[in-house]
Image (spheres, helix red, strand yellow):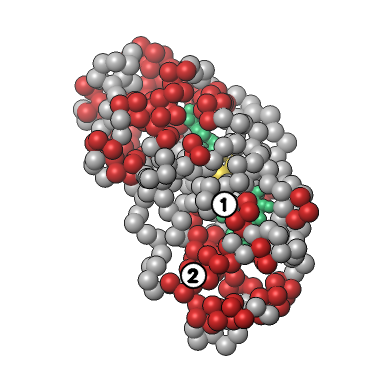
Amino acid sequence: MKILLVFALMFSTYAFAQSGHDHQDKSQSGGDQHGDMHDDHHGKGMHGGMHGGMHGGGHKLDKATLKHFFEPLPASIIDENKNAALIKLGKKLYSDPRLSVNDQISCNSCHRLDNFGVDSQATSPGHEGKRGGRNSPTTFNAALHIAQFWDGRAKDVEEQALGPILNPIEMGMPNEAAVVDKLKKIDEYKALFAEAFKGEKDPIQYKNVGVAIGAFERTLLTPSRFDDYLKGDEKALNDAEKRGLQKFVHMGCANCHNGVAIGGNSYKKIGLVEPYETKDMGRFAVTGLETDKKVFKVPSLRNITKTAPYFHDGSVATLDEAIREMAEHQLGREVGPGFVDDVKAFLGSLTAKGKE
Ligand code: HEC
Ligand code: HEC
């Protein structure tokens, strides 16, 4: 498989180089590419390379190719009217430092709502300034991912939210009962929980903290110009962005970064083609499988121009470098400034509309 992959990539490199990039390749809108589109849905490595090789060229991707790789953001993934009380409670909890042992740290400290859901640091200072080894990913659009955390160890945002509160280097609460006791002494929460969990006898439960925060996080979707483009608004992207999108697909980035979150839907090894140096074994810690060493959840690229630094350990400072490293380590390709600039332009179209 690996040899095949490398071969496919070499072939794609060759064909891509041959195709130039100014002319409009007519074969793109032809029927031939449909053949390789049915299986291998969300990126198993080879597809994009071959695809790129066969169809490199023009600036325009046809609708079928776009649809194959990407999906626009849904308008909503939670009924915000029906769950208004729950979401209101979740939002309050998300930003409340009283959920931490010293009343100093909230979810919002590391996942700032006014800063694209991140704190812009390589690793985040938690309780008593202690830092873990991983970069804080954004909470924006995270509810769409197949699972939570870089290694996918929590199944959804509801489950995930219960981790940091008890984590000694994050919010540092000693145990679930201590959190519940603390909340029960706050009148405002008595009312908010009662309203959010109507009909429950004892609504202030640890589990319900997660349910409420998760409900709030489900509202953190950020529609972008790329979504408008996917829905058929040709003018939503400018020429550089369209060029970048095409390069992103043809180079093979979209093999892994695809779907509704442009990532977040699969696990892949960092250093798939060119080995990548890291002590973090990623998903291996969750599954114990040898093949999961250095495997991480493929990050979503929504709002990516706003969420530096990059990679699981925050070791990559700029998006330019992240793009170059990805091309090298995941695809075995060296890319120049033209590629980086165009792809970066495309990635900018994934930023929340109105906040670019
Ligand atoms: C001290 C900083 C810190 C605090 C406080 C914190 N987080 Fe995080 N958060 C992180 C880090 C670091 C990770 C990645 C850890 C990992 O993958 O192992 C993370 C991961 C996540 C993820 C997963 C996103 C993804 O793409 O997989 C979500 C969702 C999240 N946090 C929500 C929350 C919520 C909700 C709270 C409050 C209850 C919270 N965080 C508190 C630092 C923090
Ligand atoms: C084989 C799968 C795969 C391919 C192909 C791939 N990526 Fe990635 N990408 C990943 C994984 C896995 C990570 C997380 C790596 C880590 O943090 O260790 C990642 C991380 C990133 C990041 C940093 C995200 C963040 O939040 O820190 C960017 C930006 C990125 N990729 C862009 C690209 C671009 C551009 C291409 C094409 C040149 C590309 N990727 C090709 C799997 C892939």
Residue toward you, 185 or 248? 185
Q: How many marks?
A: 2
Kind of residue indicated by mark 2: Lys
Q: Earlier in the sequence, mark 1 or mark 2?
A: 2
Asked whether mark 2 lies closer than 8 Å to ligand 1, one says no
Kind of residue indicated by mark 1: Arg
Examine the rendering and report whether any part of residue 281 can be seen: no
Q: Position of residue 153 (x, y in %)?
A: 62, 54
Residue drawn at (57%, 47%) of the image: 118
Residue drawn at (59%, 77%) of the image: 189
Q: Residues within 10 Å of mark 2 (few under 14, many from 20)?
A: many
Residue toward you, 269 or 184? 184
Q: Kindly indicate the quadrant of the structure image that contains residue 339.
A: top left
Examine the rendering and report whether any part of residue 124 can be seen: yes
Q: Which residue is mark 1?
A: 112
Report the quarter where the C terminus lies.
Answer: top left
